[in-house]
Amino acid sequence: MALADPVRRSILRRLAKSDARVTDLAAAFPISLNSVSKHIRLLERARLVERRVSGREHFIRFTPEPLTKAQQWIESQQAFWTSRLQAIDDLLTAEDAAQGPALTREIRHAGDS
């Protein structure tokens, strides 16, 4: 959900370059400061950004660790399912090879009728 909105993805792209003040982030969008702040709060809840307050300034920093963990999980799932699908393919290929001569005879006899 945190990455579903293009504004939040854009905020993260900007923060990947360097930390930024909330006001500087907001200046890049045709929406209100309040709206950008809501997007930032959602990113904070997802732990994709951290806020540091210095006086009246709020600085936002990108924290990529949650994305790294998600990527690692996706890669493990991909490896698991790739191996499972390969096992099914190998099994079906072996089954087809074993039935090959019998299927060929059945097809010939069916054509004789």
Image (cartoon, helix red, strand yellow):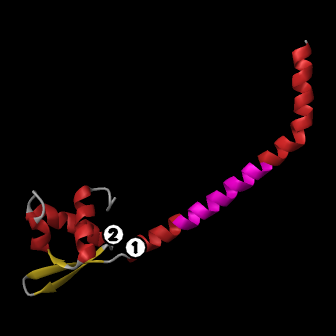
For disc 1, the neighbor class at 10 Å (few under 14, some 14 to 19, many from 20) is few
Q: Which mark is residue 46?
A: 2
Residue type at the position of mark 2: Ala
- In primary-sequence order, the first of circles 1 and 2 is 2
Residue type at the position of mark 1: Pro
**Decide: marks 1, 2 in contact (CB < 8 A)?**
yes
Tell me which residue sits at (92%, 28%) in the image. Answer: 105
Which residue is most to the bottom? 54
Cα separation between marks 1 and 2: 8 Å
Task: Find out whether residue 71 is within the magenta segment.
Answer: no
Q: In the rendering, at what x and y percent does residue 94 appear?
A: 83, 48
Instruction: Find disc 1 in the rendering and name its residue.
Output: 66
Tell me which residue sits at (32%, 56%) in the image. Answer: 4
> As drawn, is 75 to the left or to the right of 58?
right
Q: Is residue 45 above or below residue 91?
A: below
For disc 2, the neighbor class at 10 Å (few under 14, some 14 to 19, many from 20) is some
Which sits in the foreground, 97 or 68? 97
Q: In the rendering, at what x and y percent does residue 97 appear?
A: 85, 43
Residue 41 in sight: no
Q: Which residues are magenta?
A: 75-91
Quarter holding the C terminus?
top right
Q: Quadrant of residue 68?
A: bottom left
Label 2 element class? loop
Tell me which residue sits at (50%, 71%) in the image. Answer: 72
Tell me which residue sits at (22%, 70%) in the image. Answer: 14
Q: In the rendering, at what x and y percent does residue 2 appear?
A: 31, 62
Of helix, strand and loop, which mostly describes the magenta segment?
A: helix
Residue 95 in sight: yes
Label 1 element class? helix
Q: Quadrant of residue 109?
A: top right
